[in-house]
């Protein structure tokens, strides 16, 4: 799937928002991607995950790991299309960890699938958690990399779409300085 098709899906689903937003990272941005407008539509989720699965179908993947919450849906659908197991991490004392009896072994080959990457902090925590089990990470993919090239990982990284948007620290946000009031979409409370 081409980037313009992915961008069109984001627009058609109402996922690409314009305004003044507080991101999960605490940074401010004039754009926000409400991934659940895409993920609530199985046909879009299936199409997007098919693009991820096709990148890794012949890589020997045995497990797909998705960080909670959007990564669970994307990880599951990608794993279903590859024909392998899907597990996920969730926050425990502020860090991404496996729970619910999920484990890996050194013989597993892991693909990590995330929804949106802005700073990459959550994904680094997932990589650290997978590394505890000695399982090789074959790759990392996401729907959208909006890190402006700042998110770096020690594993192969293949986002479906790269969007470069401005982000600002709250104390140096031109939107705030112009009198705009920032809103915090999504469900993460910080």
Image: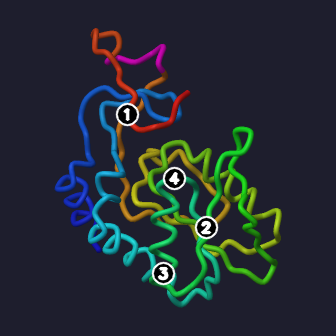
Which portion, as a residue range, is magenta? 170-175
- What's the CA distance linking mark 2 and mark 1? 25 Å
Residue 177 point in image, percent of width and height: 34, 10
- What's the CA distance linking mark 1 and mark 4? 15 Å
The residue at which mark 3 appears reads as: 80
Q: Main secondary structure of the magenta part?
A: helix
The residue at which mark 2 appears reads as: 65
Do the residues under discs 4 and 2 have CB atoms within 8 angstroms?
A: no
The residue at which mark 4 appears reads as: 69
Circle nearer the viewer, 2 or 3 = 3
- Looking at the image, which residue is at 21% across and 55% down? 13
Please give the count of numbered marks on the rendered protein: 4
Q: Is residue 19 above or below residue 86?
A: above
Name the one closer to the observer, 114 or 37. Answer: 37
The residue at which mark 1 appears reads as: 185
Q: Is residue 146 above or below residue 49?
A: above
Q: Earlier in the sequence, mark 4 or mark 3?
A: 4
Q: How is the image coloured?
A: rainbow
Give the left or right position of residue 178, taking residue 70 as reference.
Answer: left
Under circle 4, the secondary element is loop
Q: Residues within 10 Å of mark 4 (few under 14, many from 20)?
A: some
From the image, which quarter does the N terminus lie in?
bottom left
Q: Is residue 64 above or below residue 10?
A: below
Under circle 2, the secondary element is strand
Q: Residues within 10 Å of mark 2 (few under 14, many from 20)?
A: many
- What's the CA distance linking mark 3 and mark 1? 30 Å
Q: Earlier in the sequence, mark 3 or mark 1?
A: 3
Kindly identify which numbered label has been placed on residue 43.
none
Under circle 1, the secondary element is loop
Residue 174 point in image, percent of width and height: 34, 17
From the image, which quarter does the C terminus lie in?
top right
Name the one closer to the observer, 100 or 96. Answer: 100
């Amino acid at each position: 799937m081409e980037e313009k098709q992915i961008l069109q899906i984001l627009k058609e689903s109402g996922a690409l928002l314009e305004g003044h937003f507080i991101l999960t990272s605490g940074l401010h941005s004039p754009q926000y991607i409400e991934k659940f407008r895409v993920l609530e539509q199985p046909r879009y989720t299936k199409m997007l995950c098919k693009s991820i699965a096709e990148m890794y179908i012949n890589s020997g993947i045995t497990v797909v790991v998705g960080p909670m919450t959007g990564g669970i849906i994307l990880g599951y659908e990608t794993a279903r299309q590859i024909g392998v197991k899907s597990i996920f991490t969730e926050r425990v004392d502020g860090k991404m960890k496996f729970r619910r009896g999920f484990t890996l072994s050194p013989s597993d080959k892991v693909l990590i699938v995330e929804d949106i990457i802005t700073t990459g902090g959550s994904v680094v925590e997932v990589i650290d958690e997978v590394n505890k089990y000695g399982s090789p990470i074959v790759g990392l993919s996401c729907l959208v990399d909006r890190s402006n090239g700042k998110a770096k990982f020690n594993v192969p990284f293949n986002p479906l779409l790269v969007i470069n948007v401005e982000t600002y620290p709250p104390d140096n946000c031109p939107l705030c300085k112009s009198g705009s009031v920032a809103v915090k979409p999504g469900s993460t409370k910080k």
